[in-house]
Image (cartoon, grey):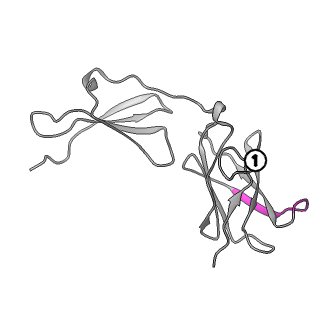
């Protein structure tokens, strides 16, 4: 049976903010890595891959100190996902909830009647939006890249039959 990998969050409840940010590095304490060695730590910050290294803590029995190099483009409020040997840890946030970066892009004039908005899983800076069905049967779709503040129309590739 695999160990339950978890980060020590600031509220000690297993969710929310965890670790300390120093420049471009996040240091966080984690449990569930096994007795004395990690089995290949992988980390993602806001869906972006991040270099991570884990060492057995000298100060806290049963815990590992994990250093995560924050990738370019990571933002306060991003979700941090860590796994050890393929076993995922509970997710936590980079920085506190009040530190989250808010991004927006104005809707294009051609997309004033939005019918659906979808966000990509971990990386919240990509959003798709659909308008009402057009006369040709397609649904106008736009992709928003909030990090670059752009909106791009997606040309329909298939029409409903």
Give coordinates of residue 88: x percent, y percent: 60, 63
How many numbered marks, from 0 up?
1
Please, what secondary structure does the residue beneath circle 1 have? loop
Residue linked to disc 1 = 19
* Residue pictured at 64% horizontal, 75% vertical: 2
- Is 68 situated left or right of 158 in this image? right
Q: Can you say whether 84 is above or below 118 in the image?
A: below
Quadrant showing the N terminus: bottom right
**Corner quadrant of residue 132:** top left
**Corner quadrant of residue 113:** top left
* Residue pictured at 73% horizontal, 69% vertical: 33
Give coordinates of residue 5: x percent, y percent: 67, 64
Instruction: Reply yes or no: does residue 91 show up in magenta.
Output: no
Q: Can you say whether 22 is above or below 58 in the image?
A: above
- Is 146 situated left or right of 112 in this image? right
Give coordinates of residue 46: x percent, y percent: 57, 45
Seen as rendered, the residue at the extreme bottom is: 1
Q: Nearer the viewer, residue 142 or 113?
A: 113
Q: What's the magenta region?
A: 52-60
Give coordinates of residue 118: x percent, y percent: 37, 41
* Residue pictured at 41% horizontal, 29% vertical: 150
- Is 161 situated left or right of 131 in this image? left
Seen as rendered, the residue at the extreme top is: 109
- Is 45 situated left or right of 30 in this image? left
Q: Can you say whether 98 is above or below 52 in the image?
A: above
Q: Nearer the viewer, residue 21 or 19?
A: 19
Rate crowding at label 1 as few (under 14), some (14 to 19) or many (20 or more) other CA atoms within 10 Å: many
Seen as rendered, the residue at the extreme right is: 59
């Amino acid at each position: 049976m695999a160990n339950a990998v978890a980060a020590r969050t600031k509220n000690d409840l297993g969710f929310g903010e965890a670790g300390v940010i120093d420049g471009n590095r996040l240091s966080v304490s984690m449990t569930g890595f096994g007795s004395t060695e990690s089995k290949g730590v992988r980390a993602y910050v806001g869906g972006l891959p991040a270099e991570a290294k884990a060492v057995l803590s000298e100060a806290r029995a049963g815990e590992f100190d994990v250093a995560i190099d924050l990738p370019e483009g990571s933002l306060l409020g991003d979700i941090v996902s860590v796994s050890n040997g393929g076993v995922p840890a509970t997710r936590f946030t980079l920085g506190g909830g009040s530190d989250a970066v808010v991004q927006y892009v104005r809707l294009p004039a051609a997309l004033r009647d939005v019918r659906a908005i979808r966000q990509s899983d971990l990386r919240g800076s990509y959003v798709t939006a659909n308008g009402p069905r057009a006369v040709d049967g397609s649904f106008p779709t736009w992709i928003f890249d909030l990090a670059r503040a752009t909106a791009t129309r997606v040309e329909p590739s298939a029409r409903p039959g």
